[in-house]
Image: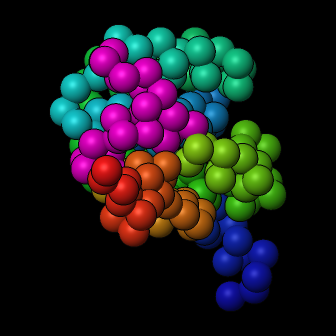
Amino acid sequence: MSSKANANAQRFELEQTLMAIGLRPTSYRALMLLPLIYVAWADGKMEHVEVERIRRFAAENLHLTPDTSAVLDNWLKEAPSQQYVEQGLRGLLGVAVDEDFLEVDVAELPDLLLHAEGIARATADALNDPNAVTPEEEVALGEIARLLEVDGGATWKCVLDALRTHYPPKSE
């Protein structure tokens, strides 16, 4: 099979995968919200502050069409399944690396991980507190980094925990 035929077959498979999870070409860019959605739902609930931040990110970073808005509304109402998230994140990577898709640039993927961590730190009790990241959110951030093939590094919570372990405060 020629490289062009192989690329066409991969693109067709990607389009079929995205169609299977309810996305059409007019809503592919909504995939950029999936990492944020996944982290927000990781602890089993979607907090009001998370909804606000996700909607603000969408308004500032996406051209919200009726299709992308409908996808977002569904994700905010009901947590996507683990299988859905995995397919969606693989689809997001596929759309980003395929030069024929102009919806997402591969250079945007690392920033999505940072925004997802920001969502994890956004709780009603501790807005932007690195210690607010739950163990479930840590796992979700690791999965996002793995599936998007982005070096996620360590969250601020992990860095702070490591510093506390290595450098405990001196007692007087």
Left or right of 54, for residue 74: left
Residue 109 visible: yes
Examine the rendered structure and indicate whether residue 32 appears above or below residue 90: above
Q: Residue at x 22, y 36 (%)?
A: 43
Q: How is the image coloured?
A: rainbow
Please say whether residue 38 is one of the residues in the magenta stretch.
Answer: no
Looking at the picture, how far across and down is residue 111, in whole percent? 66, 45
What is the quadrant of the N terminus in the image? bottom right
Inspect the magenta stretch and tell me whether residue 133 lies in it. Answer: yes
Residue drawn at 70 percent across, 71 percent down: 7
Q: Identify the residue at image location x=72%, y=47%.
A: 108
Name the residue at 64% across, 29% down: 26
> Can residue 101 be seen at all in this image of the molecule?
no
**Picture layout, residue 39 above or below residue 57:** below
Q: Position of residue 152 (x, y in %)?
A: 54, 61
How many numbered marks are there? 0
Horizontal relation, residue 75 to residue 101: left or right: left
Q: Position of residue 170 (x, y in %)?
A: 36, 56
Which of 120/84 is in front? 120
Q: Which residues are magenta?
A: 115-138
